[in-house]
Amino acid sequence: MAKSLKSLKSRAGRVVAGVVLVGAVSGLVFVIRSSAEQRSWASTEGTVVERLRSGKSFSVKVEYPLPDGTGQVATLSENGPARHPGDHVTVRYDLRDGHVVDAAPADNDQAHWVAGGMLGVLALGSLFATLLAWAPTPKPE
């Protein structure tokens, strides 16, 4: 432990601890902003048209109505429970100038909570490492 603490107190260790702290805090801020922004989007009920698989991840094609009565079909990442054709899903969408700019399933909050939790733990750990790296070394008496 003493050896790892010495390497953490080196110049490179201090720089790495600081960079990880800045990265973790920046990532956490991004996840929180993204989640808050998605919650402000309009939402509507849609119907799953097709379930697609790409490698290990799944996405769904969802058809949903817009306020002007037109229908919209979008391929959305499936981060929550598995959806199958015919299932109803709530879709949040960002509408600008009459066009959908971005859309996501309303249960996408789970992914934000997981990412936020992981980044929060990383931020706390890197804060602790940064404090250890920059703490003054006790003088021997």
Image: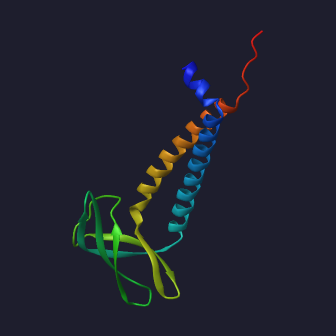
**Residue 131 spot, x, y in % from top left:** 66, 33
Residue drawn at 48 percent across, 45 percent down: 118
Residue drawn at 21 percent across, 71 percent down: 85
Q: Is residue 121 left or right of residue 72?
A: right
Residue drawn at 61 percent across, 35 percent down: 13
Q: Is residue 55 above or below residue 135?
A: below
Q: Nearer the viewer, residue 43 or 121?
A: 121
* Rendered image quadrant of residue 29: bottom right
* Rendered image quadrant of residue 135: top right
Q: Nearer the viewer, residue 138 or 72?
A: 138
**Residue 133 spot, x, y in % from top left:** 65, 31
Q: Nearer the viewer, residue 66 or 5?
A: 5
Q: Is residue 49 left or right of residue 26?
A: left
* Rendered image quadrant of residue 93: bottom left
Residue drawn at 39 percent across, 62 percent down: 107
Q: Is residue 57 above or below residue 141?
A: below
**Residue 2 spot, x, y in % from top left:** 58, 19
**Residue 68 spot, x, y in % from top left:** 44, 90
**Quarter of the figure that contains the N terminus:** top right
**Quarter of the figure that contains the C terminus:** top right
Coloured how? Answer: rainbow
